[in-house]
Amino acid sequence: MIVDEIIKRLISSGIYKYEAEIARDLEMSPQNFLSRKKSGGIKDSLILLAIHKGLKEDWLLTGQGEKWADKNDASWPIKALIEQMQETIRVQNARIDQLQTNIDKGLDAAFKSDKKIDKLTDALLRCHAEDSLKPLQILGGSAK
């Protein structure tokens, strides 16, 4: 799997010794890192991290060519930063969408609960009204 190869190259570059260090730099728990590693959903984050650390994407993906980006090219950290920010924005947008979905579900559940409470209140009031009329009916009076 390409993710395993990328991680092996990150470690072989000397930047990292252990996967836990990579997880820390990605601000992930080791469990989240392993889960995303298995699903392959961490590839883009690993590429951005490697570029940010100065590795060339081609080498990272294929193991061929130059390992390190040309530090004389002043644009490489800016490009890496822009890509990292774009990834962060994408992840944050996904989180916002999930939060909005959860809020919508919560509001829908609350609305349904309010309707149930209203129905129960109406039923209790009807029962109470009927019960308060029973003494008059027993005595032969009328409830007007």
Image (tube, rainbow, N blue to C red):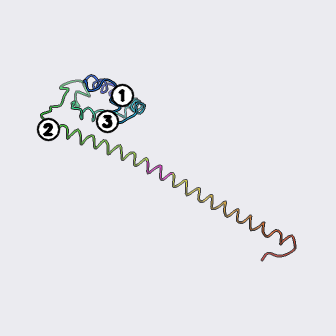
Q: Nearer the viewer, residue 14 or 107?
A: 14
Which picture quadrant has residue 84?
Answer: top left
Q: Earlier in the sequence, mark 3 or mark 1?
A: 1
Residue 114 magenta-drawn? no
Instruction: Say which label, 3 or 2, has the lower sequence index.
Output: 3
Q: Which mark is residue 74?
A: 2
Q: Is residue 131 left or right of residue 71?
A: right
Main SS of the magenta part reads helix
Inspect the image, locate mark 2, and give the three-letter code of the amino acid beneath it: Ala
For residue 20, the mark is 1
Measured from the top left, where is residue 45 in percent x and y?
Answer: 31, 35
Magenta range is 99-105
Identify the secondary structure beneath mark 1.
helix
Q: Which mark is residue 96?
A: none
The local secondary structure at tag 2 comes to: loop
Query: Quadrant of residue 127 in the image?
Result: bottom right
Q: Amino acid at mark 1?
A: Ala
Is residue 101 a member of the stretch shown in magenta?
A: yes
Q: Is residue 137 above or below residue 117?
A: below
Earlier-in-chain disc, 1 versus 2: 1
Residue sitting nearer the eye, 138 or 27: 27
